[in-house]
Amino acid sequence: MHWLRNFIKLWRDSALAANQRGAALIEFVLTFPILIFATLFVFDIGRSAYTIMTLNGAAADAARYASVRGTLSLNPATTQDITNFALGRAFGVGPGVLDVAVTWDPSPLPGAEVEVVITYSMDMIMARIANVDPIPVRGRASVTVH
């Protein structure tokens, strides 16, 4: 055991220890940016999944809202009413950059189809670093008018 203590003392006092510390610093400098980019990438993927699910849910809610408020209902919904309803359901997504399109096929009468499409230009963190344009994300739902 005595030889082990002598070896450790010799290693600490030698240039070998200084080289090891320098190598660890270089390894850290090389791997840290990769770790940061991987973390940002995972964050962007999670945020994209959340945004897609939110837009699909908001479109489904708005299509349901429109389907029960057709022309023959007591309180018929206008396109602006449906748009406002959809914007109110898109929690966590910037409302200033959402585009809502409502389509009645053929008209807002019972038996017709109403389709709500919500489009959002998602600005990803990694896209900013790579200087890429925002990515369009859509939520879509279609329901039969009652």
Image (spheres, rainbow, N blue to C red):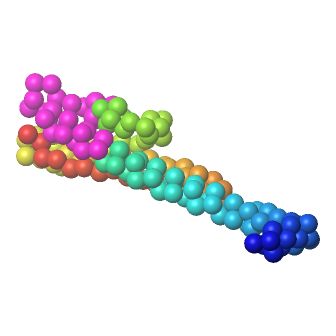
Residue 48, given in percent of the width and then of the height, sits at 44, 53
Horizontal side, residue 65 vs residue 10: left or right? left
Quarter location, residue 74: top left
Q: Nearer the viewer, residue 129 or 102?
A: 129
Quarter location, residue 127: bottom right
Residue 71, given in percent of the width and then of the height, sits at 13, 33
Which image quarter holds the N terminus?
A: bottom right
Look at the image and give the residue range highlighted in magenta: 57-84
Q: Is residue 53 positioned above or below 22 on the image?
A: above
* Residue extending furthest toward the top: 74
Residue 89, given in percent of the width and then of the height, sits at 32, 35
Residue occupying the point 47% across, 56% down: 45
Residue occupying the point 16% across, 47% down: 143
Q: Is residue 52 positioned above or below 63 on the image?
A: below
Q: Main secondary structure of the magenta part?
A: helix
Q: In the rendered structure, does residue 91 fall within the stretch colored magenta?
A: no
Residue occupying the point 85% across, 71% down: 6
Residue 53, given in percent of the width and then of the height, sits at 34, 49
Q: In the rendered structure, does residue 72 fall within the stretch colored magenta?
A: yes
Which image quarter holds the C terminus?
A: top left
Residue 91 in sight from this viewpoint: yes
Q: Nearer the viewer, residue 20 or 61?
A: 20
Residue 17 in sight from this viewpoint: no
Q: Is residue 71 positioned above or below 3 on the image?
A: above
Horizontal side, residue 84 vs residue 25: left or right? left
